[in-house]
Image (spheres, helix red, strand yellow):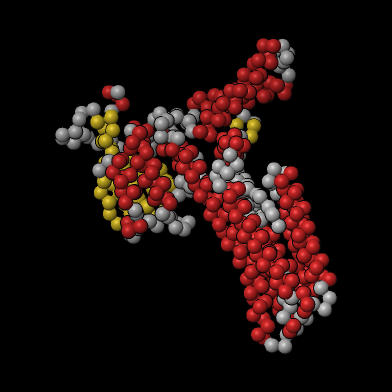
Amino acid sequence: MSFSFVVDPDLDAPDKEPSAGGQKVPSRWNRWLAAFDEQSATDTNGLGGQHLGIGLTISGAFIAAFLFGQFVVEWNGYPFPTLSVIAWVTLLSAALVINLVVQRMATRMPLWLFLVAVGIGTVVVVLDLAGCWGLTGAGIYPTAAPAVGALLMSMITLRGTGDILIAIGVLGILLLAGALTEDRRTALTFGPEILTLAVAIIPPLVGAGIARGFRRMVQRELDLVLVQSTISQPRFAVGMLASEQLARLDLDAETLLNDVAQGRTALPLGPTTAMTAAALATALRLHLIEGRTETWLHHAISESEFLGPSVTLVDPSGLAGLLSPSQREGLLLTIWLLVGDTRGPAASVALRFGSILPAPSGTAQRQLVFPLELETIGVPRRRVDPETWQAIRAVGPYIDANKDGSLQVDIECSVDNPADV
């Protein structure tokens, strides 16, 4: 069985599609994919997904070869090996056909093709179990049935983890049911059945775990690139989502005005066109008046799949926008490292910006000083690595303390007075 598949990054990814002006805006994950489409077209190994798919496929091929060799060794013990031979022929033929179909579909496996593969695998398991029925006393055990797990390994990077786990569960249930219903003279013959079950389900389970970790790693890196892009934004600005929506609305408005200017759309406007124009005008007005009190930090947190659920920001005066680029980078890295160290759904990070304080003696008069309180839940001080402390020092002098088993850091931020810039 030979496959050369790549990771389908649409799997296990959130799909948020906010509407703007009556139109759908692509999800952030889809926008990332669009941004990387050009690079992926020239370098299919860019993110290592194809390497992972090839590695899993080769591993599955070795397992299938081992099981087929076991079938050849047991050949003389079969009174009638017809059903097992049919099972092997069906499995190898299905692997070849599925490989060709997937290659023609640009290394993508739709749901219908996956269901067909699972159905064929079920038929293979039933045929092989029937062919080996009652032969445990002669040392004959299923071989084509556990090889279905090798077929599933080649699909791991093409389908979601949930789909693969369900297929593995069905395979395990069928093999276990066949082993439990087998007529045995002694319980010792159940040992090879356990080994057969392990060979069938453990490799694809491990492969699914590896693929899920790889997808999460890629998503985290792309998310980090996204939030780092907010460092260079002005103090108050719209976020990336709003910017894309505004660009789309602007294009729609220009298209409508150009149609009117070129005479393609007659005046007065028809009811449908008039409603479209009114919706565009309303959406543009809303964009002009909203979002101008939200700082770069608000957008970095709210538009991040990892920071959003775990980070709470309280900054009524928008003081985060006064931080210098180095302070912004240090604060963002601090939050990211702390969230990366969290465990469990209750873990979180809270940021509270205080009001501007009088400048202490010895401080330049053009400096503004305000406190920043950083408090974590579920992140004890002993688990904070040195890189996090270095990032905190880039924001300003700090005092840290343990509070009910969690970390609390009070940072003194000194920034340039915008009135003097």
370 to 124, vertically: above or below: above
Q: Is residue 115 visible?
A: no
Q: Position of residue 94 (x, y in %)?
A: 77, 57
Number of numbered discs present? 0
Q: Is residue 305 visible?
A: yes
Q: Position of residue 400 (x, y in %)?
A: 27, 51
The picture quadrant where one finds residue 245 is: top right
The picture quadrant where one finds residue 39 is: top right
| 84 and 256: which is toward the camera | 84
The residue positioned 33% from the left and 44% from the top of the image is 391
The residue positioned 60% from the left and 44% from the top of the image is 15
269 to 132, vertically: above or below: above
The answer to whether residue 142 is left or right of residue 361 is right
| 346 and 247: which is toward the camera | 247
The picture quadrant where one finds residue 368 is: top left
The residue positioned 67% from the left and 86% from the top of the image is 187
Tell which residue pokes out farthest to the bottom in this image: 185
322 to 171, vertically: above or below: above
Q: Position of residue 275 (x, y in %)?
A: 68, 24
